[in-house]
Image: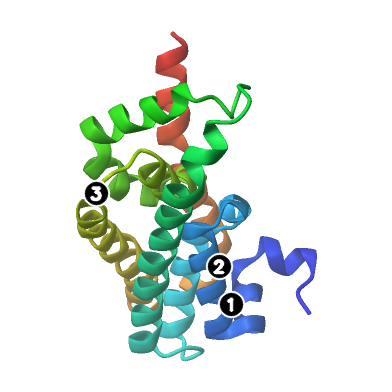
Amino acid sequence: MLSLTAFIDPTAIIQAAGYVGVAAIIFTESGLLVGVILPGDSVLFTAGFLASQGYLNIVPLLLLSFTMAALGDNVGYWLGKRFGPSVFSREKSFLLNPENISRAERFYEEHGAKTIVLARFMPVIRTLAPVLAGVGSMKWRTFMTYNLMGATIWGLGVTFAGYILGAKVPGIDRYIIPIVLVIVFSSVIPPLWQYARRRR
């Protein structure tokens, strides 16, 4: 059973739940709105590191990371396409505003492809981007192309980075928590910077 410490420490999560835990976190964060609280970046990196130490096998881990990232985004897209318009067309409020449909459509017409790829590296935005792509009626073929590109760069890239560092840098295990914190902090900077610019 996972404790609060295990939730904070991705190493504990993976050692307790293995491949199933990695798959569940990556899929949920990529495709379900409840996944905004999950630490996808740090889980991928730590899983790669643990593979370098013999806890996991890197080949199935890479395949699993890529598949769950791509599949999760597709589920998010489908949920947005299926339920988004009806939900946003209800009583007008801060979130349930019909104007948000038009905004989403315009945003994804202009920035859609770039957003799907870059959002992979931004917590919260990573979870919301595929849903809004479905709400905004982005064509599935276009979405799928950049979804696979993002899943490759993020799902395979972050995992393999953890594996390479674990295999090549002696004693890296002593710094795994600080490295994870740097990854989380770095991934939060871009959305905060954009928010500050828009406020100005």
Mark in front: 1 vs 3 = 3
Please tell me which of labels 1 and 3 falls first in the chain: 1
Q: Secondary structure at mark 2?
A: helix
Q: CA distance from mark 1 to mark 3?
A: 31 Å
Could you say which is closer to the camera, residue 173 or residue 145?
A: 145
From the viewer's perspective, tell me whether residue 169 is left or right of residue 20: left
Kindly identify the residue that appears in the image at 52 percent across and 84 percent down: 19
Kind of residue sitting beneath label 2: Ile
Please tell me which of labels 2 and 3 falls first in the chain: 2
Any part of residue 132 in sight: yes
In the rendering, at what x and y percent does residue 66 appear? Answer: 34, 72
In the rendering, at what x and y percent does residue 99 appear? Answer: 45, 22
Kindly identify the residue that appears in the image at 53 percent across and 31 percent down: 89
Q: Secondary structure at mark 1?
A: helix
Q: CA distance from mark 2 to mark 1?
A: 6 Å
Q: Which mark is residue 190?
A: none
Q: Which mark is residue 21?
A: 1
Report the residue marked by disc 3: 139
Q: Which mark is residue 25?
A: 2
Q: Quadrant of residue 8?
A: bottom right
